[in-house]
């Protein structure tokens, strides 16, 4: 999943937002990535509410004069493995093979 997803994902248990990210493995997509290029053309690359890469709300970023250009990387950096956790209800979700598993860990018998 890209960092951009942090701007969209909410906790399926309690609708808590944003989820806290603990990234363990990342890769940067090449600059000529087709998906990213399309987004750039639409000029819609900025995070709109919360930027996962900066770990700050857009409001805070604006007040600290951090430009939205940083969010280009939110589309390019792919989180391959890590954990997401809800700061409200403490539910935890794993990111495995680049895919966030939005089912709370307690539903898994073993820790996959
Ligand atoms: Zn961002
Ligand atoms: Zn929650």
Image: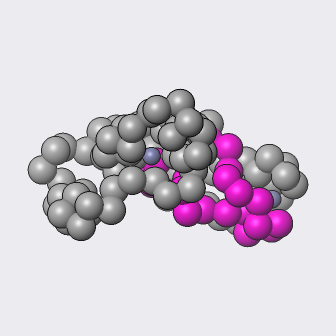
Q: Is residue 33 visible?
A: yes
Q: Where is residue 40 in the image (x, y as percent from the top left)?
A: 22, 58
Residue in the foreground of this view, choosing between 108 and 77: 77
Q: Quadrant of the N terminus?
A: bottom left
Q: In the drawing, does residue 84 fall left or right of residue 26?
A: right
Q: In the drawing, does residue 81 fall left or right of residue 76?
A: right
In the rendered structure, which segment of residues is drawn in magenta? Answer: 1-21
**Magenta segment: does it hold 22?**
no
Instruction: Please name the predominant secondary structure of the magenta segment in the image.
Output: loop
Q: In the drawing, does residue 26 fall left or right of residue 100?
A: left
Residue at image location 18% in from the left, 54% down from the top: 33
Q: Position of residue 61 (x, y in %)?
A: 53, 38
Residue at image location 76% in from the left, 67% down from the top: 15
Q: Where is residue 19 in the image (x, y as percent from the top left)?
A: 68, 51
Q: In the rendered image of this protein, does residue 12 appear above or below residue 30? A: below
Residue in the foreground of this view, choosing between 69 and 64: 64
Residue in the foreground of this view, choosing between 16 and 80: 16
Residue at image location 58% in from the left, 46% down from the top: 59
Q: How many marks?
A: 0
Q: Can residue 111 be seen in this view?
A: no
Residue in the foreground of this view, choosing between 83 and 58: 58
């Amino acid at each position: 999943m890209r960092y951009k997803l942090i701007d969209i994902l909410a906790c399926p248990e309690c609708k808590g937002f944003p989820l806290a990210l603990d990234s363990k493995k990342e890769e940067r997509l090449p600059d000529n990535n087709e998906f990213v290029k399309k987004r750039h053309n639409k000029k819609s690359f900025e995070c709109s509410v919360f930027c996962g890469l900066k770990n700050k709300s857009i409001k805070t970023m604006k007040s600290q004069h951090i430009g939205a250009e940083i969010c280009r990387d939110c589309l390019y950096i792919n989180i391959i493995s890590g954990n997401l956790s809800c700061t409200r209800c403490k539910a935890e979700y794993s990111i495995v093979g680049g895919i966030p598993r939005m089912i709370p860990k307690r539903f898994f018998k073993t820790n996959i």
